[in-house]
Amino acid sequence: MKKTRFRTGAAAVGLVLLFTVGCSGDGDGDGGGDAVRIEVDKVVALADESVRIEVTGLDAGQEVTVTSRATDHAGTSWSGRAAFAADEAGAVDLTRARPRSGTYEKADGMGLFWSMNAQKAPADEAWFYATWPEDRRAYEVHLAVEVDGKQVAAERLTRTWMSKGVVHRPLTAAKDGVVGTLYQPAPGAPRRPPVLSFGGSEGGPGDKHAAALLASRGHPVLALCYFGCPERPENLERIELEYFADAARLLHREAGAGAQRPSVIGNSRGSEAAQLLAHHHPDLVRDVVLYAPSRDTNPGIPDPKVPAWTKDGEPIELKPIPLDRVRGTVLAIGGGKDGLWPAGPSTTAIGEQRGASGQQHRALLYPDAGHGVGTYPHTAAGLRNKHHLTGQDVDMGGTRAAAQQARSDSWPQVLELLQD
Protein backbone atom coordinates (compact mmCIF):
# COMPACT_ATOMS: atom_id res chain seq x y z
CA MET A 1 0.00 0.00 0.00
CA LYS A 2 1.05 3.61 -0.36
CA LYS A 3 2.79 5.36 2.50
CA THR A 4 4.03 8.82 3.26
CA ARG A 5 7.65 9.23 4.30
CA PHE A 6 8.97 12.47 5.77
CA ARG A 7 12.59 13.34 5.00
CA THR A 8 14.91 16.06 6.20
CA GLY A 9 16.99 18.32 3.99
CA ALA A 10 16.07 20.88 1.34
CA ALA A 11 16.21 18.28 -1.45
CA ALA A 12 13.32 16.37 0.07
CA VAL A 13 11.02 19.17 1.18
CA GLY A 14 7.47 18.51 0.10
CA LEU A 15 8.18 15.16 -1.59
CA VAL A 16 5.44 12.59 -1.19
CA LEU A 17 6.08 8.88 -1.44
CA LEU A 18 4.14 7.51 -4.37
CA PHE A 19 5.18 3.90 -4.57
CA THR A 20 6.40 1.01 -2.47
CA VAL A 21 7.57 -1.90 -4.63
CA GLY A 22 4.84 -4.38 -5.47
CA CYS A 23 2.05 -1.93 -4.53
CA SER A 24 1.90 0.53 -7.44
CA GLY A 25 -1.04 2.86 -7.75
CA ASP A 26 -1.60 1.53 -11.30
CA GLY A 27 -0.70 -2.10 -10.69
CA ASP A 28 2.55 -1.99 -12.67
CA GLY A 29 4.89 -3.13 -9.89
CA ASP A 30 6.63 -6.47 -10.38
CA GLY A 31 8.12 -6.97 -6.92
CA GLY A 32 11.83 -7.47 -6.37
CA GLY A 33 12.35 -5.76 -2.98
CA ASP A 34 10.52 -3.30 -0.80
CA ALA A 35 12.89 -0.34 -0.67
CA VAL A 36 13.00 1.17 -4.16
CA ARG A 37 10.59 4.06 -4.48
CA ILE A 38 9.53 6.72 -6.97
CA GLU A 39 8.91 10.02 -5.19
CA VAL A 40 7.30 13.05 -6.78
CA ASP A 41 6.06 16.35 -5.41
CA LYS A 42 2.84 16.51 -7.48
CA VAL A 43 1.12 13.35 -8.68
CA VAL A 44 -1.62 15.52 -10.21
CA ALA A 45 -0.56 18.77 -11.86
CA LEU A 46 -1.36 21.01 -14.78
CA ALA A 47 0.28 19.72 -17.95
CA ASP A 48 2.59 22.74 -18.18
CA GLU A 49 3.85 22.39 -14.59
CA SER A 50 7.19 20.85 -13.71
CA VAL A 51 7.27 18.01 -11.21
CA ARG A 52 10.22 16.81 -9.18
CA ILE A 53 10.95 13.10 -9.49
CA GLU A 54 13.41 11.12 -7.37
CA VAL A 55 14.15 7.41 -7.18
CA THR A 56 15.29 6.29 -3.71
CA GLY A 57 16.15 3.06 -1.92
CA LEU A 58 18.92 2.06 -4.35
CA ASP A 59 22.47 0.99 -3.59
CA ALA A 60 25.19 3.59 -4.10
CA GLY A 61 26.33 3.49 -7.72
CA GLN A 62 23.57 1.09 -8.73
CA GLU A 63 22.56 1.37 -12.40
CA VAL A 64 18.89 1.89 -13.13
CA THR A 65 16.71 2.87 -16.06
CA VAL A 66 13.73 5.17 -15.60
CA THR A 67 11.07 5.07 -18.30
CA SER A 68 7.99 7.06 -19.20
CA ARG A 69 5.05 6.23 -21.43
CA ALA A 70 1.84 7.91 -22.54
CA THR A 71 -0.83 7.57 -25.22
CA ASP A 72 -1.86 10.35 -27.59
CA HIS A 73 -5.28 11.22 -29.06
CA ALA A 74 -4.90 8.64 -31.82
CA GLY A 75 -4.01 5.82 -29.45
CA THR A 76 -0.33 5.88 -30.42
CA SER A 77 2.06 4.84 -27.67
CA TRP A 78 4.91 7.20 -26.74
CA SER A 79 7.86 6.40 -24.50
CA GLY A 80 11.03 7.89 -23.08
CA ARG A 81 13.92 6.44 -21.14
CA ALA A 82 17.04 7.48 -19.23
CA ALA A 83 19.76 5.37 -17.60
CA PHE A 84 21.43 6.58 -14.40
CA ALA A 85 23.82 5.53 -11.67
CA ALA A 86 22.56 6.14 -8.15
CA ASP A 87 24.44 8.67 -6.02
CA GLU A 88 26.18 7.92 -2.72
CA ALA A 89 22.85 8.09 -0.89
CA GLY A 90 21.34 5.49 -3.22
CA ALA A 91 19.11 8.00 -4.99
CA VAL A 92 18.58 9.47 -8.46
CA ASP A 93 17.21 13.02 -8.51
CA LEU A 94 16.08 13.58 -12.10
CA THR A 95 16.36 17.33 -11.69
CA ARG A 96 20.12 17.08 -11.13
CA ALA A 97 21.22 13.73 -12.57
CA ARG A 98 22.58 13.57 -16.11
CA PRO A 99 21.53 10.43 -18.00
CA ARG A 100 24.26 8.04 -19.10
CA SER A 101 22.07 7.25 -22.10
CA GLY A 102 18.46 7.65 -23.15
CA THR A 103 16.08 9.88 -25.07
CA TYR A 104 17.60 13.09 -23.65
CA GLU A 105 21.17 14.04 -22.78
CA LYS A 106 21.42 16.74 -20.09
CA ALA A 107 20.10 16.87 -16.54
CA ASP A 108 16.43 17.80 -16.90
CA GLY A 109 13.70 17.01 -14.41
CA MET A 110 11.11 16.96 -17.21
CA GLY A 111 13.27 15.24 -19.80
CA LEU A 112 11.27 12.01 -19.65
CA PHE A 113 8.16 13.97 -20.66
CA TRP A 114 9.26 16.04 -23.66
CA SER A 115 11.75 13.48 -25.03
CA MET A 116 9.19 10.72 -25.46
CA ASN A 117 9.12 9.22 -28.96
CA ALA A 118 6.15 7.86 -30.84
CA GLN A 119 6.05 4.17 -31.58
CA LYS A 120 7.25 3.44 -35.15
CA ALA A 121 7.75 7.13 -36.01
CA PRO A 122 10.98 9.14 -36.41
CA ALA A 123 11.60 11.27 -33.33
CA ASP A 124 11.88 14.50 -35.31
CA GLU A 125 8.70 13.95 -37.32
CA ALA A 126 6.05 13.41 -34.65
CA TRP A 127 4.17 15.65 -32.23
CA PHE A 128 2.39 14.49 -29.08
CA TYR A 129 -1.20 15.69 -29.39
CA ALA A 130 -3.53 14.83 -26.54
CA THR A 131 -7.30 14.60 -26.94
CA TRP A 132 -9.00 18.01 -26.98
CA PRO A 133 -9.29 19.24 -23.38
CA GLU A 134 -13.07 19.56 -23.59
CA ASP A 135 -13.23 15.84 -24.43
CA ARG A 136 -10.63 14.67 -21.92
CA ARG A 137 -9.39 17.01 -19.24
CA ALA A 138 -6.12 15.18 -18.57
CA TYR A 139 -3.75 12.51 -19.78
CA GLU A 140 -1.56 10.07 -17.89
CA VAL A 141 2.19 9.52 -17.83
CA HIS A 142 3.34 6.16 -16.47
CA LEU A 143 6.78 6.08 -14.84
CA ALA A 144 8.75 2.94 -14.10
CA VAL A 145 12.14 2.01 -12.67
CA GLU A 146 14.03 -1.01 -14.02
CA VAL A 147 17.06 -2.75 -12.51
CA ASP A 148 18.78 -5.41 -14.64
CA GLY A 149 15.80 -5.39 -16.98
CA LYS A 150 13.28 -6.01 -14.20
CA GLN A 151 10.70 -3.45 -13.14
CA VAL A 152 11.02 -2.63 -9.45
CA ALA A 153 8.85 0.47 -9.07
CA ALA A 154 6.14 2.27 -11.01
CA GLU A 155 3.68 5.13 -10.72
CA ARG A 156 1.04 6.97 -12.71
CA LEU A 157 0.97 10.79 -12.96
CA THR A 158 -2.02 12.83 -14.09
CA ARG A 159 -1.27 15.78 -16.36
CA THR A 160 -4.27 18.14 -16.42
CA TRP A 161 -5.23 20.40 -19.32
CA MET A 162 -8.47 21.77 -17.92
CA SER A 163 -9.09 22.12 -14.20
CA LYS A 164 -12.34 21.15 -12.57
CA GLY A 165 -15.03 23.77 -13.10
CA VAL A 166 -13.55 25.30 -16.25
CA VAL A 167 -16.26 25.44 -18.91
CA HIS A 168 -16.10 25.74 -22.67
CA ARG A 169 -18.46 26.83 -25.43
CA PRO A 170 -18.02 26.37 -29.19
CA LEU A 171 -18.54 29.54 -31.21
CA THR A 172 -19.96 29.59 -34.73
CA ALA A 173 -20.01 32.28 -37.36
CA ALA A 174 -23.77 31.92 -37.75
CA LYS A 175 -24.50 32.51 -34.08
CA ASP A 176 -21.48 34.40 -32.73
CA GLY A 177 -19.88 36.02 -35.76
CA VAL A 178 -16.58 34.15 -35.21
CA VAL A 179 -15.46 30.52 -35.10
CA GLY A 180 -13.57 29.09 -32.15
CA THR A 181 -13.87 27.81 -28.60
CA LEU A 182 -14.43 30.00 -25.56
CA TYR A 183 -12.98 28.74 -22.28
CA GLN A 184 -14.19 30.28 -19.03
CA PRO A 185 -12.57 29.81 -15.57
CA ALA A 186 -14.37 27.90 -12.86
CA PRO A 187 -17.04 29.88 -11.02
CA GLY A 188 -15.57 31.55 -7.99
CA ALA A 189 -12.00 31.27 -9.24
CA PRO A 190 -9.88 34.44 -9.26
CA ARG A 191 -10.51 36.22 -12.55
CA ARG A 192 -7.55 37.30 -14.64
CA PRO A 193 -7.48 39.31 -17.88
CA PRO A 194 -8.95 37.67 -21.00
CA VAL A 195 -6.77 36.26 -23.78
CA LEU A 196 -7.43 35.95 -27.51
CA SER A 197 -5.22 33.32 -29.13
CA PHE A 198 -4.73 31.99 -32.66
CA GLY A 199 -2.22 29.88 -34.54
CA GLY A 200 -0.31 30.12 -37.80
CA SER A 201 -0.37 28.69 -41.30
CA GLU A 202 -1.54 25.30 -40.01
CA GLY A 203 -5.01 26.85 -39.68
CA GLY A 204 -7.76 25.09 -37.80
CA PRO A 205 -9.09 25.54 -34.26
CA GLY A 206 -5.99 27.08 -32.66
CA ASP A 207 -4.12 25.96 -29.57
CA LYS A 208 -6.93 24.59 -27.46
CA HIS A 209 -4.62 22.99 -24.93
CA ALA A 210 -2.85 26.27 -24.17
CA ALA A 211 -6.26 27.98 -23.96
CA ALA A 212 -7.51 25.41 -21.43
CA LEU A 213 -4.35 25.80 -19.35
CA LEU A 214 -4.79 29.57 -19.26
CA ALA A 215 -8.47 29.21 -18.32
CA SER A 216 -7.38 26.88 -15.51
CA ARG A 217 -5.38 29.84 -14.17
CA GLY A 218 -8.32 32.24 -14.30
CA HIS A 219 -8.14 33.71 -17.83
CA PRO A 220 -11.21 33.71 -20.07
CA VAL A 221 -9.72 32.55 -23.39
CA LEU A 222 -10.98 32.50 -26.96
CA ALA A 223 -9.09 30.03 -29.15
CA LEU A 224 -9.92 31.49 -32.55
CA CYS A 225 -10.04 29.80 -35.95
CA TYR A 226 -9.50 32.26 -38.79
CA PHE A 227 -9.13 29.79 -41.67
CA GLY A 228 -9.19 26.06 -42.29
CA CYS A 229 -12.41 25.25 -40.44
CA PRO A 230 -16.16 25.28 -41.19
CA GLU A 231 -17.61 28.73 -41.98
CA ARG A 232 -14.14 30.16 -42.63
CA PRO A 233 -11.89 30.38 -45.73
CA GLU A 234 -10.03 27.22 -46.67
CA ASN A 235 -6.69 28.99 -47.24
CA LEU A 236 -4.67 31.76 -45.62
CA GLU A 237 -5.90 34.30 -48.14
CA ARG A 238 -7.86 37.57 -47.80
CA ILE A 239 -8.44 37.21 -44.06
CA GLU A 240 -10.22 40.32 -42.83
CA LEU A 241 -8.62 42.23 -39.96
CA GLU A 242 -12.16 43.11 -38.88
CA TYR A 243 -12.70 39.44 -38.05
CA PHE A 244 -10.03 39.59 -35.33
CA ALA A 245 -11.49 42.86 -34.02
CA ASP A 246 -14.90 41.21 -33.76
CA ALA A 247 -13.35 38.34 -31.82
CA ALA A 248 -11.65 40.75 -29.39
CA ARG A 249 -14.95 42.58 -28.79
CA LEU A 250 -16.84 39.34 -28.22
CA LEU A 251 -14.22 38.11 -25.74
CA HIS A 252 -14.32 41.39 -23.85
CA ARG A 253 -18.10 41.10 -23.51
CA GLU A 254 -17.96 37.45 -22.46
CA ALA A 255 -15.23 38.15 -19.89
CA GLY A 256 -17.74 40.11 -17.84
CA ALA A 257 -18.14 43.56 -16.38
CA GLY A 258 -14.93 45.26 -15.33
CA ALA A 259 -12.70 42.99 -17.39
CA GLN A 260 -9.56 44.47 -18.87
CA ARG A 261 -9.00 44.60 -22.60
CA PRO A 262 -7.88 41.21 -23.96
CA SER A 263 -4.26 40.35 -24.50
CA VAL A 264 -3.44 38.57 -27.76
CA ILE A 265 -1.25 35.54 -28.51
CA GLY A 266 -0.27 34.97 -32.14
CA ASN A 267 1.94 32.13 -33.36
CA SER A 268 4.00 32.23 -36.60
CA ARG A 269 1.75 33.67 -39.35
CA GLY A 270 -0.68 34.54 -36.59
CA SER A 271 1.95 36.93 -35.24
CA GLU A 272 1.20 39.20 -38.21
CA ALA A 273 -2.51 39.30 -37.38
CA ALA A 274 -1.76 39.96 -33.71
CA GLN A 275 0.48 42.92 -34.54
CA LEU A 276 -1.95 44.32 -37.11
CA LEU A 277 -4.82 44.08 -34.63
CA ALA A 278 -2.85 45.86 -31.91
CA HIS A 279 -1.73 48.57 -34.34
CA HIS A 280 -5.05 49.30 -36.04
CA HIS A 281 -7.24 48.72 -32.95
CA PRO A 282 -5.18 49.77 -29.92
CA ASP A 283 -8.41 50.39 -28.01
CA LEU A 284 -9.23 46.66 -28.18
CA VAL A 285 -5.90 45.14 -27.20
CA ARG A 286 -3.69 45.19 -24.13
CA ASP A 287 -0.48 43.11 -24.29
CA VAL A 288 0.66 41.03 -27.25
CA VAL A 289 2.64 37.77 -27.24
CA LEU A 290 4.29 36.73 -30.51
CA TYR A 291 5.79 33.29 -31.07
CA ALA A 292 8.26 32.75 -33.96
CA PRO A 293 7.17 36.12 -35.36
CA SER A 294 7.62 38.04 -38.56
CA ARG A 295 8.34 41.75 -38.42
CA ASP A 296 6.59 42.22 -41.78
CA THR A 297 3.32 41.20 -43.36
CA ASN A 298 3.65 38.35 -45.88
CA PRO A 299 1.70 37.01 -48.90
CA GLY A 300 -1.12 34.53 -48.80
CA ILE A 301 -0.80 30.74 -48.76
CA PRO A 302 -0.82 28.74 -50.98
CA ASP A 303 -1.02 31.48 -53.64
CA PRO A 304 1.56 34.21 -52.90
CA LYS A 305 -0.14 36.48 -55.46
CA VAL A 306 -3.15 36.73 -53.15
CA PRO A 307 -2.90 38.92 -50.04
CA ALA A 308 -3.03 37.17 -46.69
CA TRP A 309 -4.72 40.09 -44.90
CA THR A 310 -7.23 42.79 -45.77
CA LYS A 311 -8.58 45.87 -44.04
CA ASP A 312 -11.78 47.57 -45.17
CA GLY A 313 -11.76 45.22 -48.13
CA GLU A 314 -8.32 46.29 -49.35
CA PRO A 315 -5.07 44.28 -49.21
CA ILE A 316 -2.71 45.20 -46.38
CA GLU A 317 0.72 46.18 -47.74
CA LEU A 318 3.71 43.89 -47.38
CA LYS A 319 5.87 45.96 -45.05
CA PRO A 320 7.04 46.21 -41.43
CA ILE A 321 4.17 46.47 -38.97
CA PRO A 322 4.28 49.57 -36.73
CA LEU A 323 4.01 48.92 -33.01
CA ASP A 324 4.12 52.47 -31.68
CA ARG A 325 0.35 52.60 -31.08
CA VAL A 326 0.23 49.47 -28.90
CA ARG A 327 -0.90 50.44 -25.40
CA GLY A 328 0.60 47.47 -23.64
CA THR A 329 3.76 45.40 -24.03
CA VAL A 330 4.65 43.33 -27.08
CA LEU A 331 6.64 40.23 -26.08
CA ALA A 332 8.35 38.56 -29.05
CA ILE A 333 9.71 35.02 -28.62
CA GLY A 334 11.89 33.52 -31.35
CA GLY A 335 14.60 31.02 -32.19
CA GLY A 336 17.95 31.90 -33.68
CA LYS A 337 17.87 28.78 -35.88
CA ASP A 338 14.33 29.11 -37.18
CA GLY A 339 14.12 27.05 -40.37
CA LEU A 340 10.94 28.62 -41.77
CA TRP A 341 11.76 32.30 -41.81
CA PRO A 342 14.05 34.85 -40.06
CA ALA A 343 12.15 34.87 -36.77
CA GLY A 344 15.38 35.58 -34.87
CA PRO A 345 16.06 39.00 -36.45
CA SER A 346 12.33 39.77 -36.33
CA THR A 347 12.22 38.99 -32.62
CA THR A 348 15.12 41.34 -31.97
CA ALA A 349 13.63 44.11 -34.13
CA ILE A 350 10.24 43.87 -32.41
CA GLY A 351 11.87 44.07 -29.00
CA GLU A 352 13.61 47.30 -29.99
CA GLN A 353 10.32 49.09 -30.77
CA ARG A 354 8.42 51.26 -28.32
CA GLY A 355 4.72 51.41 -27.61
CA ALA A 356 2.27 54.27 -27.11
CA SER A 357 3.57 54.95 -23.59
CA GLY A 358 7.16 55.14 -24.80
CA GLN A 359 8.02 51.93 -22.99
CA GLN A 360 10.20 49.52 -24.95
CA HIS A 361 8.74 46.21 -26.02
CA ARG A 362 10.44 42.91 -25.08
CA ALA A 363 12.23 40.12 -26.89
CA LEU A 364 13.24 36.61 -25.82
CA LEU A 365 15.66 35.12 -28.33
CA TYR A 366 16.84 31.51 -27.98
CA PRO A 367 19.91 31.07 -30.22
CA ASP A 368 19.72 27.28 -30.65
CA ALA A 369 15.94 26.97 -30.98
CA GLY A 370 13.98 26.76 -34.21
CA HIS A 371 10.39 27.60 -35.15
CA GLY A 372 8.83 25.53 -32.36
CA VAL A 373 9.38 27.92 -29.47
CA GLY A 374 5.75 28.07 -28.38
CA THR A 375 3.77 27.64 -26.29
CA TYR A 376 3.59 25.52 -23.08
CA PRO A 377 6.45 23.12 -22.22
CA HIS A 378 6.85 19.44 -21.31
CA THR A 379 5.26 17.65 -24.29
CA ALA A 380 7.08 16.05 -27.21
CA ALA A 381 7.32 18.08 -30.42
CA GLY A 382 8.95 17.25 -33.73
CA LEU A 383 11.05 19.34 -36.10
CA ARG A 384 9.95 18.28 -39.58
CA ASN A 385 6.63 17.84 -41.35
CA LYS A 386 4.82 18.43 -44.63
CA HIS A 387 2.82 21.65 -44.95
CA HIS A 388 -0.78 20.75 -45.67
CA LEU A 389 -1.44 23.80 -47.86
CA THR A 390 1.72 23.85 -49.98
CA GLY A 391 2.73 20.19 -49.83
CA GLN A 392 6.31 21.28 -49.12
CA ASP A 393 8.58 19.59 -46.60
CA VAL A 394 9.13 21.90 -43.64
CA ASP A 395 12.21 21.95 -41.40
CA MET A 396 11.50 23.84 -38.19
CA GLY A 397 15.20 24.22 -37.39
CA GLY A 398 17.05 23.91 -34.10
CA THR A 399 16.76 20.88 -31.83
CA ARG A 400 14.02 19.35 -29.72
CA ALA A 401 15.98 20.07 -26.56
CA ALA A 402 16.50 23.74 -27.50
CA ALA A 403 12.81 24.16 -28.32
CA GLN A 404 11.84 22.72 -24.95
CA GLN A 405 14.30 24.92 -23.14
CA ALA A 406 12.78 27.93 -24.89
CA ARG A 407 9.27 26.89 -23.90
CA SER A 408 10.24 26.16 -20.31
CA ASP A 409 11.94 29.53 -19.95
CA SER A 410 9.44 31.69 -21.82
CA TRP A 411 6.10 30.23 -20.67
CA PRO A 412 6.38 31.49 -17.05
CA GLN A 413 7.23 34.94 -18.42
CA VAL A 414 4.19 34.82 -20.69
CA LEU A 415 1.98 33.87 -17.75
CA GLU A 416 3.39 36.73 -15.71
CA LEU A 417 2.74 39.24 -18.49
CA LEU A 418 -0.82 38.04 -19.10
CA GLN A 419 -1.84 38.18 -15.45
CA ASP A 420 -0.08 41.46 -14.63
Image (tube, rainbow, N blue to C red):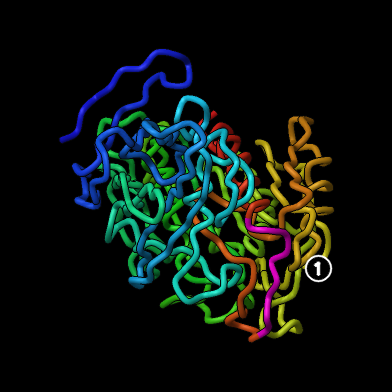
Residue drawn where x is 79% and y is 42% of the image: 351
Amino acid type, callout 1 = Leu
Q: Is residue 18 left or right of residue 420?
A: left
Looking at the image, residue 72 lies above or below residue 49: below
Q: Is residue 397 magenta?
A: yes
Residue drawn where x is 68% and y is 83% of the image: 392
Give the image location of residue 202, x and y in percent.
Answer: 57, 72
Residue drawn where x is 33% and y is 45% of the image: 184
Give the image location of residue 314, x and y in percent.
Answer: 70, 72
Q: Is residue 308 left or right of residue 377?
A: right
Looking at the image, residue 187 lies above or below residue 198: above
Give the image location of residue 296, x and y in percent.
Answer: 79, 61
What segment carries the magenta color?
Answer: 392-400
Q: Which residue is mark 1?
A: 318
Judge whether residue 408 can be spotted in this image. yes
Foreground: 364 or 82? 82
